[in-house]
Image (cartoon, helix red, strand yellow):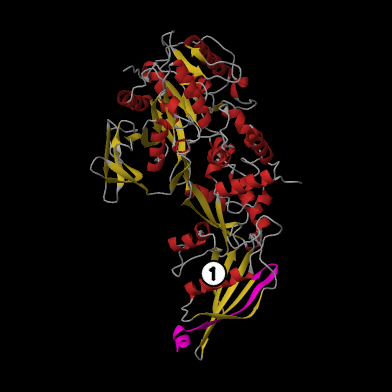
Amino acid sequence: MTTTALEQELKEMIIETLELEDVTPEDIDPNEPLFVEGLGLDSIDALELGLALQKRYGITLESEAESSRQHFANLKSLAALVESRRQQ
Amino acid sequence: MTFRRLADRPWRDRATTDAIAWIPPEADTPSRWLTVPEWHARIGAWQQRLLETPNTSGSWRLFEPDPIEFSAALIAIWERGDRVVLPADNQPKTLSALDEAGVALGPTEPGRKSGRTGSPPDHPPQWHSRPLPAIAVSLYTSGSSGEPQRLDKRFDQLDAELATQASLWPLSGRLVVSQVSHQHIYGLLFSILRPLCENSPFSARPCRYPETLYTWLQHCQATGKRMILVSAPPALSRLPEALDWKPVSAALATIYSSGAPLSKDASDRVHERLGHSVHEVYGSSETGGIAWRVQQQAPDWTALPGVEVSHDEDHRLWLRSRHLETPDQWQRQADLIARTQQGFELLGRADRIVKIGGKRISLTAMDRALSALPGVERVQTLTLQRRDLRLAAIVQLSPNDIPHDHRQHRDTVKRLRRELAAHFETPVLPRYWRFVAPWPTNSQGKLSAEIRQRLFLDLEDRRAPRWLGEQLHENGWRITLEVPEHCAYVDGHFDGQPVLPGIALVHWAMQQARRLFTLNGEFESLERLRFPQPLLPGDRFEMSLDHRRSDGTESLRLEGESQRGKHVTGRVALIHRQARES
């Protein structure tokens, strides 16, 4: 499994922002769901993560928020979102 | 002010020119209004569904996230003269606990998926002369015993509350947009029933995210609509500053918040960004609305019209209110308050009920659910105020179940959270876990506030170990510690295998020794110090400390050992400052 630098950065951001005290970057499987099962994040975390993405990468999620939340499915999709918005 | 009581069935003869709900734009579909005839066809559809569903109990369990379907089903049930039971969520355990309470409707109905796909086909409504049921809705909330507690609301109670709100803050035909669930009393009243009684449209979709709110405000701005936002602290405390709210904020008319108090900071930020103050409503499922405040005007709460507030010597709140089951009687509540010049302030609760992300949870119920899980011997859950209020759990596990390293710790946390997820929603599951054996107590045998604080000290101080208990051992102490995963001493976190430098162990030993023994001397030198193998992040280990003083010499023997073996052995020689100076 290769982890890109961006994925690593996002893992660290998630752990730091959400204060996941016992989670290390290696624990986050890029293909595993971030929410509920998998990492176990919840609706409060989703809001927090949205804010962190804006602060860190200046990404304002699409106003069609429902679809942009699909980018939160797992780390891979989150990285793809950041990647595509950065290039714009 | 336009207001008609639920008892007068305002849904039957709404002017056909009225719009019931606003269906927001989605992908390529522009927004539109749901008309009265269309809505009536949904009520008729649900009436048909009820006719076809065998039910002799006179009560229906309704869990339906779609506001239009929800409102139509609610009215169809009332028109039949039946009672509506509202589960707070659709967790399997919540629903199975309510199995006795009528027949299920909505996406959790046997054999149904979710949303409109499973909704019944349109049908003209039937207006009979059947009286409305004695009990309009039954809600479930966490009681202080930890058991779900059923609360019945009559129409006169709901109407009293709806009338009060209509007189204080009339909706005046503006669009009501909700960020909260209508399965709870606040959402039910503010986002569904108020619009029905005040002839105002509500949004056909919940507005979960700030970006959605932004788009809808833009839309309102462009089309000359004004919006009333029914919200709650989790959403309001996280309005992104990156969005430029200024150009759209004129479309907003009022913001409501309930579920838990909003912090002053968050309230000020909303005011600054959206240009409107938040109207906070304080109340509960049992009591209905009690008071309100606008923090930019005053921090105190003002009782709602028709609600009388008092307290006893213990600061327990006493209420007399038309929203209560017995409107003439003073009733004692679990909330603690103090009188202020202009109203009152909230001091917390007298029982173990807390709110996490606006969701009410009984710590007693959480303790009980956790205690019932395999390997768990004793539990105490508590709240920690971090960025948000979150639950933490101190869990005594059987010796075989104690995790000894990072992987086992993660697996244990995952297992416990997975099992709890059948009973509780994700945000209320404990976020911080301390696995202990035996139960850590002070000399009086209590898990005191001081011990609780020590158990979570590593969250405050990135240099501290995770302390999990200590016992007298031979001539000294044996302390159970863990290496926190994000400990500041752990090096090379992201390249190769990070380890805890040996010297950090000596530092921790000295810190613990200062707390446990009376050390006269100060650090002088390290003797016969060995670090046979390094500790890894997440490792659990025992630190034995032995303090010796004889013939004017003082020393601390230390030994650190985990399941994998020894990590440190050696001695710290201490010297008396006077001795050094002489």
Compared with residue B250, is residue B500 higher up or lower down, i.e. above or below?
A: below
Is-magenta flag for residue B282? Answer: no
Q: Position of residue B332 (x, y in %)?
A: 32, 43
Which amino acid type is shown beneath numbered disc 1? Answer: Glu
Q: Position of residue B508 (x, y in %)?
A: 55, 69
Q: Residues within 10 Å of mark 1 (few under 14, many from 20)?
A: many
**Which of these two is toward me, B103 or B194?**
B194
Give the residues drawn in magenta, as a range: B561-582
Q: Quadrant of the N terminus of chain B?
A: top left
Compared with residue B28, is residue B463 higher up or lower down, i.e. above or below?
A: below
Asked where in the image residue B97 lies, by quadrant, the reply is top right
Query: Helix or strand or loop: what does disc 1 sit on?
Result: strand
- Does residue B60 appear anywhere in the picture? no
Asked where in the image residue B495 lies, by quadrant, the reply is bottom right
Q: Residue furthest front?
A: A88
Q: Position of residue B63 (x, y in %)?
A: 54, 28
**Which of these two is toward me, B183 or B519?**
B519
**Which of these two is toward me, B120 or B131?**
B120
Residue occupied by mark 1: B470
Q: Position of residue B266 (x, y in %)?
A: 41, 40
Compared with residue B471, is residue B342 higher up or lower down, i.e. above or below?
A: above
Q: Given the image, what chain letter belongs to the residue carrying mark 1?
A: B
Compared with residue B351, is residue B64 higher up or lower down, i.e. above or below?
A: above
Is-magenta flag for residue B580? Answer: yes
Tell me what residue is drawn at x 35 percent, y 45 percent.
B335
